[in-house]
């Protein structure tokens, strides 16, 4: 496996390193001293002693502030940097409360089981006799679950288990819920988009059930640094939440360098792969001494990078990823903590707050999706009093290339705001069913059920026979809990199950909106980093049969797409162009798929498919360009010329979207056309790839000019002549990246920006 990486991307000779230096830009963040305050005088003696045993004699200012607010019963979010001691912000008031009353209970929610288990170890390390902490997740043996319910006063779990394992069976948890005083939401920033909307619904269901048992717990949130932690916590829970964002912890000096892989074919604009460069950096740093963590985007990439690095430095490097056995994960964590392991290639499983001790350097292979994630990963370096090194290795991608040319946007850019829309009917409806199963829905709840006006959804559910009315209440009409049929990490609709063809094992599921693109017959599908080939797609039973795949081919669907404007929520007429947002209906049909070599991108041919059309109701923003603006921009008056320019601009706009909006380019879709019947002009649509929308398009609309300027600059600043993956070619294009006109895209975007220079008043 490592041979695949080194044979296709051999190390570049030292002479070439001198001729083509890799570091495009560097920025040094100065060291920051700690700001501390004494421990509270009235802290219980046993807790004070345990802190002393852990060498905690003072609190950072943000820890002290969080402790004061939470012990006073104020819902509070702490959004500070990696390794800033956020865990103690909620541990201290929680443990203090349990020390005073061991009948009080607390619920801790983490996005991953690994993080919850890490926090379980941290709580047990306090060795407090009145604290009975236990994990309750999919790995908890069934024979132990009753004991957890009966004896634990701190339960550590995840939103998925709360949704399916606790809330539908709340009567079994009646005593725990009656005494519930604290709810901790860790890594708040990960609950965004459609997943965030599901988490919001689950948390509001928790509040509703807790109220039934007379409990009104205090909520504590821990988050990476995002633009709107208090607002986001409010959107998830409906509570007024205090916000703590000033970090009192010390930080060593950090040097962040942007690394530009060398060109392998200057004429084609292709570069040495990000993974090959990352492997070289990881092994080189380990040889030089620093303990180094390399972040990559998939399980296979982690194994490739680690294996290639081991060929140079031996067993001092391992991979850390989802799918490892618990003992394998602990072996890596122990190795990093005790220093026996010097390098790790990891997925974002290590981005979240799992404690892996002291690291000197971090390598980040490609843009991780958000600035919050980038700084979260970078924050893994420098946990000691020595300067930390962080290297961001750019992908061949419009956003990464833009950051190389405009590094100031990375040093000084504002953080993204997280979004979660619980009113999305595709999310709200299934959770209304779950809420009705848990407790009947009274008429007086209609206008504010789960924090939103649910009257239309309740009426539709009753008309469909899923709810039945008795007096002034609605009850779940089905058999058993509906929660098991609601996957909170998918986009909605009845999912397709992914099943191992040989064993029948359920591997996962994929939402209806994405199934035809990702698990069509012949597709190469990646699930949590593991790679499978799709043998068959059963449309009636909604099952994709897959087999493990270890080849070097990727598949790319060819898609026919149409967009219809259903409703315009807001529009701005800027000169002879326009920017709008609203609800759209997207119809797609996957016509074929192209097979390509993984590392080279070489096309191996196109295979036709026979699949039905699918329909997606979602939200979009769109840009309209009048014909005379195009003519003045020098675009020929023919359909193909305009189509190529608009198509290239659409790709670049999607590629740069994560610069202004907390999303991944794979979360959205696009369509460009020389003329659209609903707008009467050339139009570029960018839409959320989820039923009902995920808030991405609405937020991108508000970023308007900033986003378009970055898009134009990214395309214009690319050194290629015809367009390349660094500017206008897209890895997810459903039309095989045809037609594309890079120069035309620059002229089109420049003409639009000239028109946008004097915006008129909003028409929405």
Image (cartoon, rainbow, N blue to C red):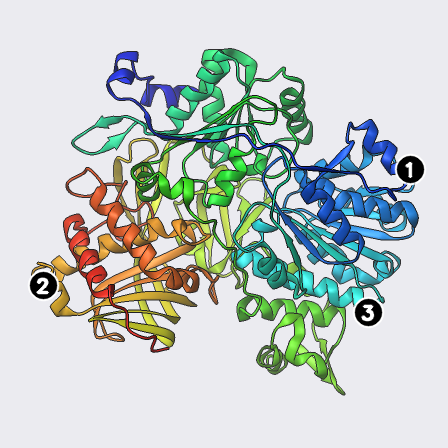
- Identify the residue shown where x is 49% and y is 50%: 544
| Residue named by callout 3 | 212
Mark 3 vs 2, N-terminal side: 3
The quadrant of the image that shows the N terminus is: top left
Report, in whole angstroms, how far the alpha carbon at label 3 lies from the one at label 2: 66 Å
**Which residue corresponds to the image point at 33% horizontal and 22% vertical from the top-left?**
9
| Picture residue at 15% right of the left edge, 55% below the top | 747
For marks 1 and 2 on the same chain, the one whose residue lies earlier in the sequence: 1
Residue 15 is left or right of residue 343, and the answer is: left
Contact, CB < 8 Å: mark 1 with mark 2? Answer: no
- 437 to 734, vertically: above or below: below
Q: Nearer the viewer, residue 494 or 229?
A: 229
Looking at the image, residue 37 sits to the left or right of residue 507; the answer is right
Which image quadrant for residue 612?
bottom left
Question: Tag 2's secondary structure?
Answer: helix
Q: CA distance from mark 1 to mark 2?
A: 77 Å
Q: Which mark is residue 45?
A: 1
Which dot, 3 or 1, sits closer to the camera?
1
Q: Count neighbours of disc 1 (C-alpha within 10 A) and say few if under 14, some if 14 to 19, many if 20 or more.
A: few
Distance of label 3 from label 1 (alpha carbons): 35 Å
Count of numbered tags: 3
Position of residue 165 relative to residue 329, above or below, is: below
- Crowd class of label 2 (few under 14; some 14 to 19; many from 20; radius 10 Å): few
Mark 3 is surrounded, within 10 Å at the Cα level, by few (under 14), some (14 to 19) or many (20 or more) other residues, namely some
Looking at the rendered image, the disc whose residue lies closer to the viewer, 3 or 2, is: 2
Q: Position of residue 751 (x, y in %)?
A: 17, 60
Check the picture and name the quadrant holding the C terminus. bottom left
> Sequence-wise, which precedes: disc 3 or disc 1?
1
Query: Is residue 510 among what the camera can see?
Result: yes
What secondary structure is marked by label 1?
helix
Determine which residue is flagged by label 2.
Answer: 632
């Amino acid at each position: 496996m490592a041979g695949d990486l080194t044979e296709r991307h051999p190390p570049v000779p030292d002479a070439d390193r001198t001729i083509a230096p890799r570091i495009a830009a560097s920025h040094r963040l100065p060291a920051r001293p700690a700001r501390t305050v004494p421990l509270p005088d009235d802290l219980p003696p046993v807790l004070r002693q345990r802190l002393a045993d852990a060498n905690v004699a003072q609190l950072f200012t943000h820890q002290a502030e969080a402790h004061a607010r939470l012990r006073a019963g104020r819902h509070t979010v702490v959004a500070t940097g990696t390794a800033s001691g956020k865990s103690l912000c909620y541990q201290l008031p929680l443990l203090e409360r349990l020390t005073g009353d061991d009948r009080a209970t607390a619920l801790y929610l983490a996005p991953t089981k690994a993080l919850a288990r890490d926090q379980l170890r941290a709580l047990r390390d306090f060795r407090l006799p009145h604290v009975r902490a236990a994990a309750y997740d999919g790995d908890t043996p069934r024979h132990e679950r009753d004991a957890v319910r009966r004896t634990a006063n701190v339960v550590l779990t995840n939103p998925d288990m709360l949704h399916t394992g606790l809330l539908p069976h709340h009567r079994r948890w009646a005593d725990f819920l009656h005494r519930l005083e604290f709810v901790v939401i860790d890594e708040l920033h990960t609950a965004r988009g459609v997943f965030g909307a599901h988490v919001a619904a689950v948390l509001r269901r928790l509040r509703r059930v807790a109220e039934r048992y007379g409990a009104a717990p205090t909520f504590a949130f821990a988050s990476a640094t995002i633009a709107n932690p208090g607002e986001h916590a409010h959107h998830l829970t409906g509570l007024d939440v205090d916000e703590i964002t000033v970090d009192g912890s010390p930080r060593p000096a950090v040097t962040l360098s942007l690394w530009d892989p060398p060109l392998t074919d200057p004429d084609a604009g292709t570069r040495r792969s990000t993974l090959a460069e990352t492997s070289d950096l990881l092994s080189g740093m380990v040889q030089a001494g620093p303990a180094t963590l390399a972040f990559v985007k998939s399980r296979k990439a982690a194994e490739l990078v680690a294996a290639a690095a081991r060929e140079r430095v031996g067993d001092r490097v391992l991979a850390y990823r989802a799918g490892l056995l618990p003992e394998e994960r602990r072996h890596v964590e122990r190795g990093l903590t005790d220093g026996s392991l010097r390098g790790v290639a990891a997925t974002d499983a290590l981005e979240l707050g799992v404690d892996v001790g002291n690291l000197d350097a971090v390598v980040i292979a490609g843009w991780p999706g958000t600035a919050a994630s980038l700084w979260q990963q970078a924050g893994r370096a420098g946990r000691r009093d020595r300067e930390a090194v962080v290297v961001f290795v750019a992908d061949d991608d419009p956003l990464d290339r833009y950051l190389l040319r405009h590094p100031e946007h990375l040093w000084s850019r504002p953080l993204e705001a997280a979004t979660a829309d619980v009113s999305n009917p595709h999310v709200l409806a299934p959770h209304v069913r779950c809420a009705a199963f848990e407790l009947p829905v009274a008429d007086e709840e209609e206008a504010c059920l789960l924090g939103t006006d649910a009257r239309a959804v309740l009426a539709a559910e009753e008309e469909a026979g899923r709810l039945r009315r008795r007096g002034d209440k609605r009850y779940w009409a089905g058999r058993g809990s509906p929660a098991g049929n609601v996957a909170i990490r998918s986009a909605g609709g009845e999912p397709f199950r992914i099943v191992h063809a040989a064993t029948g094992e359920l591997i996962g599921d994929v939402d209806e909106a994405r199934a035809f693109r990702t698990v069509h017959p012949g597709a190469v599908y990646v699930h949590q980093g593991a790679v499978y080939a799709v043998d068959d797609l059963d449309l009636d039973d909604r099952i994709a049969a897959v087999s493990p795949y270890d080849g070097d081919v990727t598949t790319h669907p060819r898609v026919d797409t149409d967009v219809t404007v259903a409703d315009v929520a807001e529009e701005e007429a800027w000169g002879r162009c326009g920017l709008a947002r609203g609800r759209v209906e997207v119809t797609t049909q996957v016509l074929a798929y192209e097979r390509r070599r993984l590392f080279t991108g070489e096309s191996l041919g196109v295979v036709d498919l026979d699949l039905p059309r699918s329909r997606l109701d979602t939200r979009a923003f769109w840009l309209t360009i009048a014909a005379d603006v195009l003519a003045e921009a020098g675009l020929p008056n023919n359909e193909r010329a305009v189509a190529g320019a608009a198509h290239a601009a659409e790709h670049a706009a999607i590629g740069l979207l994560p610069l202004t909006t907390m999303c991944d380019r794979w979360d959205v879709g696009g369509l460009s056309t020389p003329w659209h019947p609903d707008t009467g002009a050339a139009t570029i649509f960018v839409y959320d790839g989820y039923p009902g929308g995920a808030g991405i398009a609405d937020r991108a609309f508000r970023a308007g000019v900033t986003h378009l300027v970055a898009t134009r600059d990214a395309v214009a600043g690319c050194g290629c002549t015809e367009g390349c993956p660094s500017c206008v070619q897209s890895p997810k294009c459903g039309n095989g990246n045809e037609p594309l006109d890079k120069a035309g895209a620059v002229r089109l975007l420049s003409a639009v920006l000239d028109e946008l220079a004097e915006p008129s008043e909003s028409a929405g």
